[in-house]
Structure formats: structure tokens, C-alpha cells
Amino acid sequence: MRKEYLLTPGPTPVPPAALEAMARPIIHHRTSAYQKIFQEVTELLKYVFKTKNDVLTFTSSGTGAMEAAVVNLMSSQDKALVVRGGKFGERFEEICRAYGVETENIDVKWGEAVNPNLIAEALDKDEGISAVFTTLCETSTGVVNDIEAIAGIVKRHKAVLVVDAISGLAGDELETDRWGVDVVVGASQKGLMIPPGLAFISISKKAWKKVEEASLPRYYFDFSRTKKSLEKFNNPFTPATSLMVALRQVLRLIRNQGIDDLLANNKKLARGVRAAVKSLGLELLAPGSPANTVTAVKVPEEIDGLALVKILREKYGITIAGGQGSLKGKIFRIAHLGYITDFDLIAGISGLEMVLGELGYRFKLGAGVVAAEEIFSETA
Ligand SMILES: *Cc1c(COP(=O)(O)O)cnc(C)c1O
């Protein structure tokens, strides 16, 4: 028997209250009992999104809501500005391309945040751009983008701002209304701590105008139809009822803790993990703008990065994420959001040290754990 530790930026561990809720008998979705749950969930989602805008829920993984943003906001003759600084930024471009929407891309070196001035320049140069697509936490690189600055720029143009906050929601700071973010995309299996299967999207008044004009084909992910059902706390199609009851439990936990307290805790966990890997002599992939959601660490030249992740999982039961795309084998990523706690991370860092030792990397055993403990034990 072995205890498993899930330290990945999605899926993340699920708190017992949510697991227990999912084990209860199935309820029917065309009932007042379900409507009550959906109402509470929607109100609490707005609290987490920090918005008064509509927040729609879809039964899909996060990518479904990314696609929903494209098909509800765009027409085939529209042009999109896409920030590509990692796997998920690239996904927006792929979706646009699949629907025949022309994109202009800002290519950012993987591991760096986008310079907001580049977005300002692109928008000034081409008033035909109708939407800007970017990412809060670029999960593939551990970068957090300056959404506040980007929103301040996009606000002055006719374009709407769409932010993929699938990992960043309840992970990194996000002020949807205060910053003026038109569309925010989230999903269930990251900071919201329940299994994969639900996606969320908030839509501003400015974005709703685009929805009315947009002509790309859509059916399942139609915003207008979904909003109409939401007015009665219904869904157009069968919702994932078991996930909804789990989500209600988690959102209550978040509400009780307070979203700002939760974000401050993530920040502390992130600082601890960064200090730990640095004290092991390892380098961060994104030292300039590291996310509080996930930390990406470069694998030393002499170490096999794929073996590191594999041994940690198979021998010690600790699952972290490797690198994606061009970073495969070159980095590993440790998540610190959702139901991942300080002591889970101490276990993760300890396991990491043991595997590094086994692979012949030279360092002072325990140095990472000590560095993390120093930060985790800080009071206020
Ligand atoms: C996980 C993730 C996605 C993909 O979400 P799925 O739920 O796998 O569809 C998209 N963007 C970011 C930033 C993510 O972290």
C-alpha cells in the first residue's frame, strides 16, 4: 500500500467533502433541487471570478470553453490577435484556424511573459482586430502574464480581451471586473479542485455585443441559448450533476476561507517551492514572471528529465508534470494550487531530492526541504 500525491496543474486532488458529495445518489436536473444547486454554484463562481458579469457553465473540459469563446465572439472575416508563449496560447490559434479565422500572432519565448506594449502596438496598427486571446497562467511554462496591463490596453480599443484562466483561476491573482477582462475561461480540475468535466466562462457587456454580431457556426456551446437557460438555473442539455454537487462543496470551502486568503496561500506555497528548487541548485524556467499556480524547473543537463518524473511517480507515488512540446524532458513542473497543501509539497520536494540523488545529481540532501519549511513556517 502506498499513498499517492498528485502535484500536477490539473487534474488536482479533490477535498473529501467534494468526494463525499459525488458519492450521493444522483439527482435529476429538471428539479427545483438542482436549480437551487446551480444558482448557488453560479453565485459563488462569480465570487471566485471576481465579476458581476454572466458566468456560464458547460459540460466539457476547459478547451471546450476556449472553443466556445472563439465561435461565439468571432465571424469568419474577423481577425484575432493571439499571444503564443506556450502550449495553451498556441491552442487559441489552432482553434481560430480550425474555424477559418485569421490570426495575427505575438510569439513570446517560452518561459517569458508577453510584453503588453506589443499588444498595444498590434492594436494601434490594425483596428480590424476584433479580439485578443491570451493566458493568465501559461501552464506549460509556469509564466503568469500581466493581465491587468493588457486589459488596460485592450479597453481602449473595439477588440475584446479573452483570457484563458483555466489553471490561473483560484491560482493566481485575477480581478475580472476591476481590471476589465471581457471574457475569462476556467475549468473544474485545477484551482477548483473537482474532477475534470466542467468549464466556465464569464462574459462582459462589451463581449455580449460581439456575441450578437458573430456569425461562426455553433450549437452545443451557444452562449445565448445557455444564458437563456441559466436565467431559470437550468442547462440546455443534461448537466454533469455529480460534478455540480461537488463544485458546490468546493466553492463553499473557498467562500469560507476567502478567495484572497486562498490566493495569498498559493503565493506562499509558490515562494516555498521556488526557494526549494533554487537551494538544490536548480534553475527556474520563468524567473522573471513566475506563476503562483505552477512552478517550472529546468532539468540539469546531466539528468534524464523523463526518468526523473517517471521514477518519482512509480517508485515514490508522487506525480508531478513533465515538459510539453519543445520542453519535453527539459523541465518538470510542480503545481501548488487547489487542495495541494504545504505538507504535500514538502513530501514532493523530499521525493524530488531522493530521485535527484538516485540519478547522480550532486547537492546537499535536505536543502530543498529546509528552504521550503523556512517559508512555509513564516507567520503573517
Ligand atoms: C489545462 C489547461 C488547458 C486545457 O484544459 P482541458 O481541461 O485539458 O481542456 C487550457 N489552458 C490552460 C492554461 C490549462 O492549464
Image (cartoon, rainbow, N blue to C red):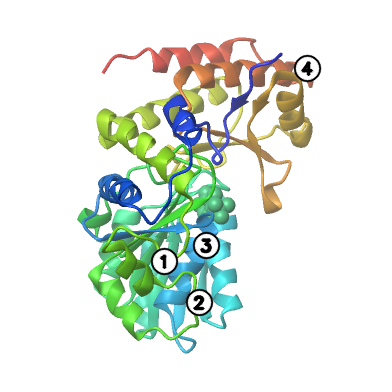
Q: Is mark 3 within 8 Å of ligand 1?
A: yes
Task: Tell me the residue that label 2 is attached to.
Answer: 104
Residue hosting label 3: 64
Q: What residue is rendered at 34% in x and 55% in y?
A: 147
Labelled pair 2, 1 in contact (Cβ < 8 Å): no
Q: How many marks?
A: 4
Relative side of 46 to 287, left or right: left
Q: How far across and how far down the image is residue 175, in percent?
A: 27, 50
Cα gap from disc 1 to disc 3, whole angstroms: 16 Å
Q: Residues within 10 Å of mark 2 (few under 14, many from 20)?
A: some
Query: Alpha carbon of mark 2 to alpha carbon of mark 1: how far?
Result: 34 Å
SS state under label 3 = helix
Residue at the bottom extreme?
A: 77
Helix, strand or loop at label 1? It is loop
Q: Amino acid at mark 1?
A: Pro
Considering only order in the chain, which callout, 2 or 3, is on the residue closer to the N terminus? 3
Q: Nearer the viewer, residue 328 or 25?
A: 25
> Which quarter of the picture shows residue 285?
top right
Quickly name the residue at label 1.
236
Q: Secondary structure at mark 2?
A: strand
In the image, residue 156 above or below residue 22: below
Q: Position of residue 125 (x, y in %)?
A: 38, 82
Label 4 sits on residue? 358
